[in-house]
Image (cartoon, rainbow, N blue to C red):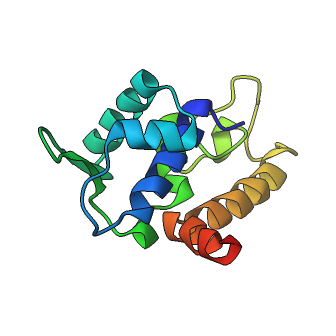
Amino acid sequence: MMSMKCKYALKALIQLGMGYDKGYIMASTISEAENIPKKFLEQILLELKHAGFVGSKQGYGGGYYLKRKPAEISVADVYRLFDGAISLVPCVSLNFYEKCDDCKSEKVCLLKPEFLKIREGARVIMSKTTIQTFLNLAKKTN
């Protein structure tokens, strides 16, 4: 299940995407618009900044902005940053592979092939779903 931190990060990125190329957006504006506790949001924005998704400017007229185009930030990128592996079991993870402690042999494991299919399906959809996807949806519903 996606953590609240990851969900809030996506909501913050969508808000920043709505203002893409229009200047800076203050954390308090995002906090109010998305009902995210401001202190928690500031921690999330700092992590997004360290990961290179957002930039910031301090002082009067400052705030946060997207460093990448909304179409270049996928749900998979954000999920991996905050929640880690997309896979349900560690032995099928692309970026966080670990051998399962309870498995005698991965070659004869009956679970691995199916969980590999599940991981790949989720990974493909999460990789194709970008911040731009949500912005396009917002345009259709408004």
- State whether residue 113 is above or below residue 33: below
Question: Quadrant location of residue 123?
Answer: bottom right
The residue located at (61%, 32%) in the rendering is 4
Residue 26 appears at what percent x and percent y? 31, 43
Q: Quadrant of the N terminus?
A: top right
Of 40 and 71, nearer the camera is 40
- State whether residue 80 is above or below residue 134: above
The residue located at (13%, 41%) in the rendering is 60
Residue 64 appears at what percent x and percent y? 28, 48
Residue 89 visible, this orientation: yes
- Left or right relative to 63: residue 111: right
The residue located at (28%, 43%) in the rendering is 49
Residue 11 appears at what percent x and percent y? 54, 48
Of 90 and 41, nearer the camera is 41
Of 17 and 88, nearer the camera is 17
Of 36 and 92, nearer the camera is 36
Q: Quadrant of the C terminus?
A: bottom right
Q: Which residue is at the far right?
A: 110
